Image: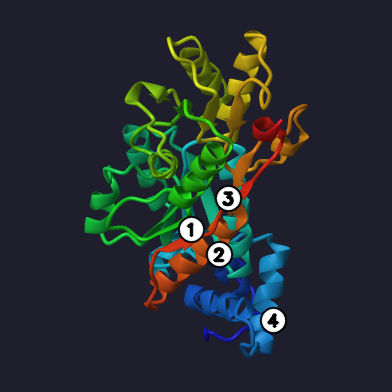
Amino acid sequence: MTDDVTADARSDEPVDDGPVTLRTIARAAGVHVSTVSRALRRAATPGATITSADARIVALAKELRYTPNPNAASLTTKRSTALGVLVPHLTDIVLSSVYDAIEGEANRAGYETFVANTHDQPTEQVRRLELLLGRRVDGMILGDAHLDGTNLAELHRRKVHFVLVSRRSPGYLSVCGDDYGGGRRVGEHLAALGHTEVGIIAGPPWASTSVDRVAGCVDALADAGVTVPPHNIVHPGFDAQHGHDGAMALLTSARPPSAIFAVNDFSAIGAMGALRELGRTPGRDVAVAGYNDVPVARELMIPLTTVRSPMEEMGVRAVQTLLAVLHGLPTSSTTLPTELVVRESTRG
């Protein structure tokens, strides 16, 4: 028997009823498995020369409803043309926007993406990393990095290619918005409005997005002669309930602030809810500023002053950076510009 397919070169051996594999096609075509593999690989390669024998094998594969197994292919090629993505919470509109851009840019480059939530828990990060690495992804984009580098050193030791997105961690390649600069713009804006008592609702101390935004705001206020005492910086978290709780703590203190900076828009929205409960109006009684400029920010009854972060561009640039790493090209960390958008919540 030769490797070439003849017009009637199908084996009389029955085809299995189980999943259709390369061996199934080979038996049906009367050729060696390697012949089927080469034919299908040529057919999937743009510009490759397809012989009549290849065309018959491709037609037979379609007739048998063959579906390639990417895991099996990756065992042979050592590549899966897939990227793994970790995020703390895909329900977060910022992270979902970043991931949507990652997926689109990866698809344009011929890659698929697998995404997993880690809930910002180190143990869950490890579990999800192993799950994605088990799929033999070519590289990882991590949106849940901790400043202390938890789990990153081990990835580096294992020579896993990865890029951080949205958050940074010292010593590792990242694509982020200018969080420090964005925080500074908020501080400068509040100081220009004459606020001398400012409260800040921060996120977890291990998230660079929170640390950098707070530092930028505090430094800008200090440059204007305004000191933010430690008790005026609370660390409840990023979501609306956290913002509500943080604002309540600040507004019921002995010296309530006249302005609040929340390092996330949803946290700022929660703070505005707390103001409503206390019978106060954002922008008139207490200035409120957020961060990210999610679509709902401008649609609120009192539109929210916020910092516009480059969510989509972060996703695109993260993929481009990782692909440069995978192809051995020189690359470096990227910090993308941010923009202050002033609305009624601070200037009312």
Q: Where is residue 77 in the image (x, y as percent from the top left)?
A: 41, 71
Estimate how packed mark 2 is, as few (under 14), some (14 to 19) or many (20 or more) residues with alpha carbons within 10 Å.
some
Looking at the image, residue 38 sits to the left or right of residue 272; the answer is left
Please identify the quadrant where the C terminus is shown: top right
Name the residue that disc number 3 marks: 309
- Separation of residues labelled 4 and 3 (CA atoms): 50 Å
Residue 3 visible (yes or no): yes
285 lies above or below 253? below
Q: Which numbered mark, 2 or 3, is in the foreground of this view?
A: 3
Name the residue that disc number 2 marks: 111
> Hey, what amino acid is under mark 1?
Leu
Disc on the earlier residue, 1 or 3: 1
Among the 4 quarters of the image, the one containing residue 51: bottom right
Disc on the earlier residue, 2 or 3: 2
Disc on the earlier residue, 4 or 3: 4
Name the residue that disc number 4 marks: 55
> Hey, what amino acid is under mark 4?
Ala
Name the residue that disc number 1 marks: 83
> In the structure shown, which secondary structural element does the residue marked by tag 3 occupy?
loop
